[in-house]
Image: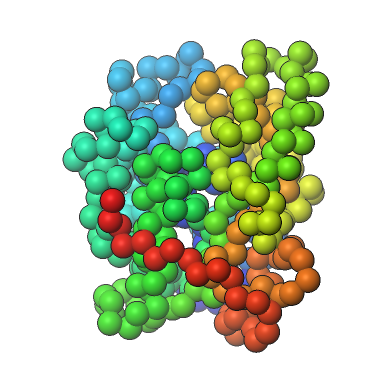
Amino acid sequence: MTDMPARRLLLVHAHPDDESINNGVTMARYAAEGALVTLVTCTLGEEGEVIPPSLAHLAADREDALGPHRIGELAAAMKELGVTDHRFLGGPGRYRDSGMMGTEQNRRPGAFWSADPDETAGHLVEVIREVRPQVLVTYDENGGYGHPDHIQAHRVAMRAAGLAADPDFRPDSGAPWTIAKIYWNRVPRPVAEEGFARLADALPDLPFPAAAQVGDVPGVVDEAVVTTEIDGTGFADAKAAAMRAHATQIAVHEPWFALSNDLAQPLFTTEYYELVRGERPRGGRETDLFAGIDETGGAAAGGEPARPAATEEGAR
């Protein structure tokens, strides 16, 4: 890429729809502000359950055509968010959805969970060295809620971030690049609890029969863990529209939504993060993922170091 925007954000997600649920307002905000927002999705989500009865034939145990369909859903979602650079790790369909933890899909040939960690990270290194992002967003070491593809996406993202900075790794894939700041998706527990309290009052008027629980929300942590919050109030409609574009996976009834289990959850329009690599200004939470990054793309001096990020080597 040439003549790239001064600010560049890379997000690594496991399946189509994860990006809209976790980071929809963040992506829309930075895209609208002129930053380059690059999304890398690791699988096509072939093993997902299908909500609309009219599309049930796409499921893995029937036509096994859900993956290609979800490519179209992701493209529609990115249009709603204003994101023009979205890719699949190694190309569409290179790695297959691994299913839930402990299922036989984990061990199928081509499953993302069983893929070689150096190979998978190598594909992401190519993207990092091309795009040269200052900021990377992905999941924590548990993938937010323990799904094998989410855990693997974390491992690949963290490993690739390290390898991309190593001049001895794959010099054919571009010049080394060090990502200044890495974030993991988070939700402060008090925010989740307040959202579900409001949901309890609204539930009788919703098309969903019951509510999920706070523990069903990926990445819920104690408030002190959260370092950064992005107010996306002005982009709430874009996030809801992007989620609605993933129609096989999400039913949206703003400001609530449900996955295939039909259990209602709050649709959060402020998104939260934990800074795990890089420095942040003193004096409370950041409100900008690019805070502390100077005009050349490096980390500015001053501030406090984030806690050391896990350096996953792909071992299980």
Q: Quadrant of residue 214?
A: top right
Q: Name the side, left or right, on which 164 lies relative to 273.
A: left
Q: Position of residue 17 (x, y in %)?
A: 52, 39
Q: Residue at x 72, y 36 (%)?
A: 193
Q: Residue at x 50, y 45 (%)?
A: 144
Q: Residue at x 44, y 78 (%)?
A: 177
Q: Quadrant of residue 122?
A: bottom left
Does any portion of residue 288 appear in the rendered image? yes
For this rendering, which residue is in front, 240 or 226? 226
Q: Residue at x 39, y 66 (%)?
A: 311
Label total for image:
0
Q: Name the side, left or right, on which 15 lies relative to 99.
A: right
Does any portion of residue 252 appear in the rendered image? no
Q: Name the side, left or right, on which 240 lies relative to 134.
A: right
Q: Name the side, left or right, on which 88 lies relative to 201.
A: left
Colouring: rainbow
113 to 306, vertically: above or below: above
Q: Position of residue 90 (x, y in %)?
A: 32, 55
Q: Position of residue 26 (x, y in %)?
A: 66, 54
Q: Position of residue 152 (x, y in %)?
A: 36, 50
Q: Quadrant of residue 218?
A: top right
146 to 102, vertically: above or below: below
Q: Residue furthest left?
A: 109
